[in-house]
Image (tube, grey):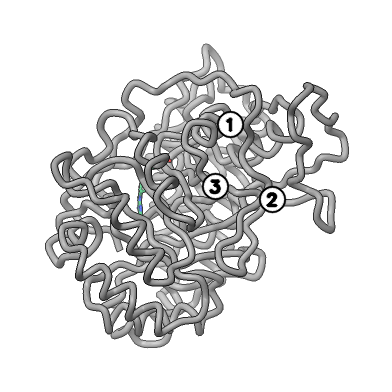
Amino acid sequence: MAGKGFTVKKDWDNPREHQMPPETRVPASVRIGPVLVSPATVLAPMAGVTDTVFRRFIRHASLFSSADSTALETPGIVPPEIDSVVTNEQSGCGLLMTEFTSADGLSRMRETKRRRYLTFYDDEHPIGAQLFGSNPQTLAEAARIVQDTGFDTVDLNLGCPAKRVVGCNGGSGLLRDLPKIAEIFRTVRLAVTIPFTVKFRMGWNDSQIVCVELARIAESEGLNGVALHARTREQGYSGQARWEWIAAVKQATALPVIGNGDIRTPEDAAAMVAQTACDAVMIGRAAAANPWIFRQIAQYTSTGSYDLPTIEDRHRMIRSYFEMLLAEADATKDLPRDARLGETAGKMKQFATWFTHGVPGGAKLRGAIYHSRTGVEVLEKVNAFFSSNSFSGAPEPEEASYPEGSLVCD
Ligand SMILES: Cc1cc2nc3c(=O)[nH]c(=O)nc-3n(C[C@H](O)[C@H](O)[C@H](O)COP(=O)(O)O)c2cc1C
C-alpha cells in the first residue's frame, strides 16, 4: 500500500533525553467513543509494518503482569490502575492500528483481496483500521466495509506525505483543503456507527498550520478522537516533533487527543503527557526497534522502573516473530505458496535490520540473513547465531533503522 517518493527517516534527529516527570504517568485508560483503550497507548499505523503478524507480535510482547511488581511508594504519585480490570495480566498496548489502506482500492477490490488487507484475529481487539482517500463517498463506503469486517474504530489518514498519496489529494494533501475535510468527516460519520478518528500532521508547512482548527472541525462533525503527529508535511521526519502543538490541540477540543511523534522510551511517553496533557500516546518507530516499549511503559507506570531486554529475550523475540510470519504464510491461501514464502523471507530480512540493532555482533547476523533464500533458512541462521555465541563485542547503538524505499508513508 505504500507509495513511492518519500522515505522515512532512519532514526531520530537530536533525540531529547527526558527525566521521568515526578507526578505524571501515561493514563490508565482513555475512551474513544464507547471503546475502552487501556492503558492509553496506541500502536501507530505503519505501512509495510503493522500487518496482522506484527500487531499480534506487539500485543504479546506487551503482556504485562503486575503480580510481582511492587506498588509505587513515592508520595504524591497516583497509584497505577492499568491492571485494575479482570485479570492481572494484560497487554501494555491499548489499541492496535492497521497499515493505511486505500479507500478507493478497498471499495473496488474483490472480496478475497479485501480480506487480505483487512485480516485481523480475535486477540487484536481493540483494533482500528486506517483509510486514506479524498472522495467522501468512497471513504464512506470503505468505512462501512471496515465496520462490517468487525473493526472497533475507523481512522482517516491526513498525514501521509508520500507523493503518490498526496498527488491524489489524499493523506497530508488534504490539509490544504479544510472544507473538503469537513465534508469527508460529515459523510463518513453518517455512514458508520463505530468510533471515527482522524490522524493528521500539523499542516502542510509552517505558514499553513491547521491542526487546531482541524481538531475543532473534527469535534463539531462528531468524530470520537484525534491523533496528531506533531510535524508538518514539509518537515517529513526531520527535526523534533513539536509537542507544543499537541498541547494546543488538547486545549482546543474536548475530544480525546492522542499525542504522536518521537517517543522512544517510557520517559519520553510520560514527558509527552506531562507537557501536553494528551489523553493517550501513540508510538510508531520505537515499537519496531524495541517491541517491548509498551510493556516497559506499563511497567514504568506501575513500578517506577522497567526491565531492559536480555540477549535471550532478543533471541526469543526474533524467533517468535519469524515463526509467526512463517505460520501466517502457511495459513494464507490467497497467493501461490512460492509467492507467500518469498514475501515472508523479504519481510524477515526487512525486520532483521531493526531487531538486530542492540545485539552485539548484529552486523554478522544481518549479513547471514541477507544471504538466505528462504524464510526457514533465515530462522536457522538466527538460531545458529544465538546458540553459537556469535554475538560478541559492544552492543550496537539502539536506533530504529528502516528499509529504504519500501516504507514510505506519513
Ligand atoms: C515505516 C512507516 C510507515 C508509516 N505508515 C503510516 C501509515 O500508514 N499511516 C499513518 O498515519 N502514519 C504512518 N506512519 C507514521 C507513523 O504512524 C507516526 O506518525 C510517525 O512515525 C511518528 O511517530 P514515531 O516518532 O513514534 O515514529 C508511518 C511511519 C513509518 C516509520
Depth-wise, is mark 1 or mark 3 nearer the camera?
3
SS at mark 2? strand
Q: Residue at x 38, y 52 (%)?
A: 346
Real-space Cα separation, disc 3 to disc 2, in angstroms:
15 Å
Residue nearest the observer in this picture, 366 or 142: 142
Q: Residue at x 71, y 47 (%)?
A: 63
Which class describes the residues within 10 Å of circle 3: few (<14), some (14-19), or many (20+)? many
Q: Which residue is mark 1?
A: 266
Residue 80, relative to residue 50: is it above or below? above
- Within the image, what quadrant is residue 239 found in? top left
Mark 1 or 3 closer to N-term?
A: 1
Residue nearest the observer in this picture, 309 or 353: 309
Q: Given the image, on which type of amino acid does mark 3 rest?
A: Ala
Q: Are marks 3 and 2 in contact (CB under 8 Å)?
A: no
Q: Given the image, on which type of amino acid does mark 2 rest?
A: Ser
Real-space Cα separation, disc 2 to disc 1, in angstroms:
15 Å
Residue nearest the observer in this picture, 81 or 315: 81
Residue 292, relative to residue 222: is it above or below? above
Q: Is mark 1 within 8 Å of ligand 1?
A: no
Label drawn at residue 197: none
Residue 50, relative to residue 281: is it above or below? below
Q: Residue at x 53, y 12 (%)?
A: 393
Q: Which residue is mark 3?
A: 280
Which class describes the residues within 10 Å of circle 1: few (<14), some (14-19), or many (20+)? many
Depth-wise, is mark 3 or mark 2 nearer the camera?
3
Instruction: Give residue 337's position: percent from left, percent from top.
Output: 45, 71
> As drawn, is 390 to the left or to the right of 117?
right
Instruction: Give residue 242's position: percent from left, percent from top.
Output: 33, 34
> As drawn, is 65 to the left or to the right of 190?
right
Label drawn at residue 91: 2
